[in-house]
Each structure stands twice: as C-alpha cells, then as structure tokens.
Amino acid sequence: MIPYLDLKAQYQAIKPEIDAAVLKVLESTEYVLGSEVAKFEEEFATYCNASYGVGVNSGTSALHLALLAAGVGPGSEVITVPYTFIATTAAIRYCGATPVFVDIDAATYMMDVAQIEAKITPRTKAILPVHLYGQPCDMDPILAIAKKHNLIVIEDAAQAHGAEYKNRRVGSLGDLAIFSFYPGKNLGAYGEAGMVTTNNAEFARKIRLLRNWGTEQRYYHTMQGFNYRMEGLQGAILRVKLQHLPRWTEARRTNAALYSKLLSTSGVVTPTVVADRKHVFHVYAIRTPRREALTGFLQAREIQFGIHYPEPIHLSRAHADLGGKRGDFPISETVSEQILSLPLFPEMTRDQVREVAAAVIEAHAS
Ligand SMILES: *Cc1c(COP(=O)(O)O)cnc(C)c1O
C-alpha cells in the first residue's frame, strides 16, 4: 500500500523534539495563546518576510478575520475562483458578502488575471487569489489591478507555505495572507490552526482583537469578536516543525520533479510550473480524460490518491443560491472532471514514486 501522505512517519522522525515541546506546554499551563504561540507568530511571519503574524484556530478563521479586517461586509463583493477548497468561498459568505468568480487558467489552474477587471463593480472590496497546490498565483497583475481600483488583496496561501513569486515569499505579497496548519498541509499542526500574515500594523491589531472577543483589556470589549485563538500546544508543535519545513519542502520538490520526469511521455498532463515561481507541491496533480479508469487501476494497486477538487464551487449545492450553472466557468468544470492528486509527502521514497508513476503509465498504455 502506498499512502497519500504519512503523518505517522513524520511524527516518528521528530518525536523527541515534539514530545518535549508538548510537555513544556502542559507544565506551563499556557494552553490558549501564550508565549509559544507568540514566538511562533514571530517566527512564521519572519519565514514569510511579513511584519506581523496573528495565530488563529484554523485557516478558515484566518480567512474570515482577514476579510473582516479588509472591511468586507454585507453588500460587499470579493473576486475569487470557483476552483478551490470550499473554505475560500464560505469565509466570504460568513461576512455577509458575495463571492464573484473568475475562471482559472487552463495551464496553472489558478485565477485567470485577464478576467478580473470585467468583474469589478462599485461593491467590489477585495481580490482573493488562491495559491493552489503550492504554486503562487500571477500576483503582479493582480496587485496592479487592485491598486488601480483601490481594492485589498488577500492571498489564500493555505497550501503554499514557503512558495515564492519572483523570489518573494507568499504571505507578504498582498495586503493580507492566510495560512492553514491543518495536519495534512505542508506545515501541519496536531489539530487545527491557522494564521494571518500582513505588513500592515492596523490590520494586525484589528485581527488580534477579533480573534479574542475584541478584548484589549480583560472583560472590556471594543468590538464584537470571536473565539478564534490558537492553542498553546499547536504553537509549540508548529515551532518545532517550522525548523524542518525547508527540508520537507525540498523533499516534496524532489519527488515532484521525479514524477514529472517519469510521466513526461505517459499521456497525462503533469503540473505546469511557471518559470518565475517556486512551487512547494502541497499537491501533485495530474490531469487525464481517463480519470475513472485510472482511479480503478490505482485502487487495485493499493495506491491512495486524492481529487482536489471534484466539484467547482459554482456548482456546489452549498452555494446554489448564488445561481451558478454548468457552463459558467468551463475551465474549472473540465479540470474538475480530469484532475487527480498522486501521493506526495516528504518521507516518500524514490521507489514509491517510481511505483506510482509506473502504475499511471500502465493505466494509460491499454
Ligand atoms: C485547507 C484550506 C483552507 C482552510 O484551512 P482550514 O485550516 O482547514 O480551515 C482554506 N483554503 C484553502 C485553499 C485550503 O486548502
């Protein structure tokens, strides 16, 4: 069996460090926020080349608070893509705002920047590009459009810890950025966690208040807030794991490069990495019109896989009230039908990569 990812192998490799960090938090009683979270916020912001990091209890909470800080509220519109994880759109709706979709680019599966300006209205408040699978979006045109129309740019970097655009790290490219530390992400907690990064002191201050009941002084609330605080245990665990992230990222990139080499003549479409980007391969996604045959083949070989994502959000029943229908975003729809994520994790061996690639090739040979 080849797993899609192997969290157990990763824990075993760093167990003494993790266990010590966890025990320290248990002894300290700093179970919510506290010094480990504060240090992790600083260290992760520095890793992103951002001035501020605010730790929260999930990537979804980070999205919600980043949108609120950007002034997104009832009546606002936020431009994003339908080809993403549901959280991106859900968070817009938590604010009472409306997601306005643009289709994706057929090569990178990310926001087609040429379609943005036509979707801007007087109600548009923000652009929310998603650095899908670990590759940054084409940020310069997005930032230029935002500047011209006075819009806020929020990066959804939930899948892209350490990714780079023209040698600049994600997390410091837009006005605000959000990260998820869900266990399966490139930097994963042992539970739920997330962060907002920004270079804007006022945004950081506001998000700090919002995550903790709008509290500046205990039991005095200057705004209506939320309980979105990061746990001390997650902060301590993430501090340990951040030290290993550069090495894990390189292992992912090495495995991805091997896949792309082995699959170059297989008939499947391998990931397009744009020359000025550093892709951190949260997901290694291939595209094939014969996905159903391939999934059956992989199952028979006990090779796990994922499908990110089988349904674009404009066709999701959860957001049916937005009035989306088939044909609205044809590239998102076609890619959803053909995409498949192969196993990829830092601990994966070259032989495992070869075995998976051989199965994909064999499945397409018949
Ligand atoms: C994982 C993810 C999120 C949400 O993060 P959680 O920590 O699971 O709440 C948001 N956007 C994208 C693109 C994601 O992959």
Image (cartoon, helix red, strand yellow):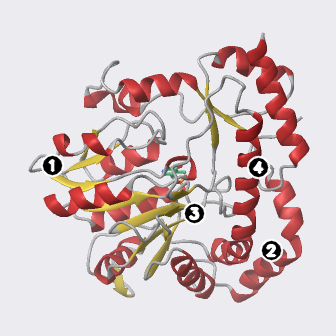
Q: Nearer the viewer, mark 4 or mark 1?
A: 4
Q: Which of marks 3 and 4 is in front?
A: 4
- In the structure shown, which secondary structural element does the residue marked by tag 3 occupy? loop
Q: Mark 4 points at which residue?
A: 255
Q: Position of residue 192 (x, y in %)?
A: 60, 60
Pick whichever of labels 3 and 4 is earlier in the sequence: 3
Pick whichever of labels 4 and 1 is earlier in the sequence: 1
- In the structure shown, which secondary structural element does the residue marked by tag 4 occupy? helix
Task: Look at label 1 and name its amino acid.
Answer: Gly
Which residue is the extreme one toward the left? 122
Mark number for residue 75?
1
Q: Which of 23 and 100 is in front in this view?
A: 100
Pick whichever of labels 1 and 3 is earlier in the sequence: 1
Q: Position of residue 303 (x, y in %)?
A: 82, 31
Q: Can residue 90 be seen in this view?
A: yes
Q: Mark 3 points at which residue?
A: 161
Q: Is residue 122 left or right of residue 233?
A: left
Q: Nearer the viewer, mark 2 or mark 4?
A: 4
Pick whichever of labels 2 and 4 is earlier in the sequence: 2
Q: Is residue 331 left or right of residue 286?
A: left
Mark 4 vs mark 1, CA separation in Å? 45 Å
The residue depicted at 82 percent of the width and 60 percent of the height is: 10
Few, some or many residues within 10 Å of mark 1 (<14, 14–19, 20+)? few
Task: Look at label 3 and name its amino acid.
Answer: His
Mark 1 vs mark 3, CA separation in Å? 32 Å
Residue 361's place in the image compared with 181, above or below, is above
Q: Is residue 74 left or right of residue 169?
A: left
Q: Position of residue 304 (x, y in %)?
A: 77, 33
Q: Mark 2 points at which residue?
A: 18
Few, some or many residues within 10 Å of mark 4 (<14, 14–19, 20+)? many
Mark 2, ligand 1, within 8 Å: the answer is no
